[in-house]
Image (cartoon, grey):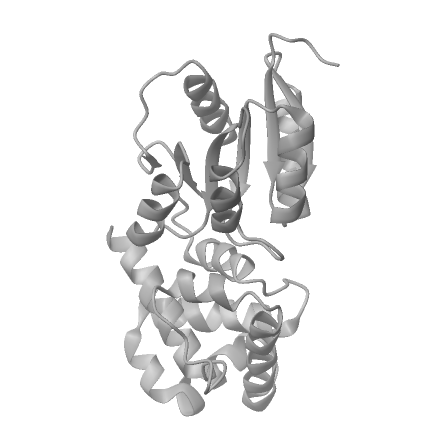
Amino acid sequence: MGDSNRIRVLIIDDNRDFTKMVEEFLSKQADFEVVGVGFNGSEALELVQTTKADVMLLDIIMPHLDGIAVLERLAGMEGPKPKVIMLTALGQEQMTRRVVELGASYYVLKPFNLETLATRIRQLVNNEPLAVVATSNVQKSDNLEVRVSNFLHELGIPANIRGYVYLRKAISLVTEDNELINGVTKILYPKVAAEFKTTPSRVERAIRHAIEVAWGRGNIEAINRTFGFTVDTRRGKPTNSEFIAMVADLMRLERSS
């Protein structure tokens, strides 16, 4: 067992590189002890019961049980529970209200400064007053492609498939110039193809595959919540152009907020 004076932290996020980075940083702080790491909501609930953590860092979009579902289960659990800091690349007001209603103490937008995160955890444990959402105190990236990358990860699109990088570029281009969405086949795909020295038809196929991967992971509820509307499951996944347009709109909204 660790020092009882240390702040006991659980890290729950399906991005293993991210969890390793946060774990390594917090473990180097004299006043923290990482008592568990999980990669989905089911593991989160098990670790809450076995670790007696003070604080849980909880990603919203995850396989099996997402962060919202974990909060719902925690609300019905007896006994002491950790304070919860939600982690997400998506700064939507509707989602923020929901996690606060379910008992989350704080909401951090990725990417963020690890020093700032550690400070917020200390303040939370010491019952210092905090604004619910970390915005001005978070390192929000000015790099559009970094923000799009975070978003695609949240939706479950793996970075090791070609469609991921094509989607990232296409969404970034449309975010900067919305008129491109009116010429997806004739203008947008050729622009992306030229960037990666491939053909427009390969770009189109790879993007379609990436969207199929996201929809095939069975987390439609989380995708619906992310986009803030109900996807027509009778019609299936959105077309390439619909998906690109939706995410580009969200990127522009985030930039203006």
- Viewed as shown, does residue 246 lie left or right of 166? left
Say which residue appears at 60% left-offset and 45% top-offset: 13
Q: Is residue 237 visible?
A: yes
Say which residue appears at 38% left-offset and 49% top-offset: 142
**Whether residue 165 is situated above or below residue 41 in the rendered picture:** below
Q: Position of residue 134 (x, y in %)?
A: 36, 35
- Viewed as shown, does residue 10 lie left or right of 73? right
**Whether residue 212 is situated above or below residue 2 in the rendered picture:** below
Location of the N terminus by quadrant is top right
Q: Extreme right residue here?
A: 1
Q: Position of residue 130 (x, y in %)?
A: 32, 25
Q: Extreme left residue here?
A: 256
| Along the viewing direction, whichever of 37 and 81 lies nearer the viewer | 81
Number of numbered discs: 0
Q: Position of residue 210 (x, y in %)?
A: 59, 74
**Whether residue 254 is situated above or below residue 165 in the rendered picture:** above
Say which residue appears at 71% left-offset and 13% top-offset: 2
Q: Examine the image and state in which quarter residue 174 appears.
A: bottom left
Q: Is residue 40 visible?
A: no
Q: Position of residue 22 (x, y in %)?
A: 61, 33
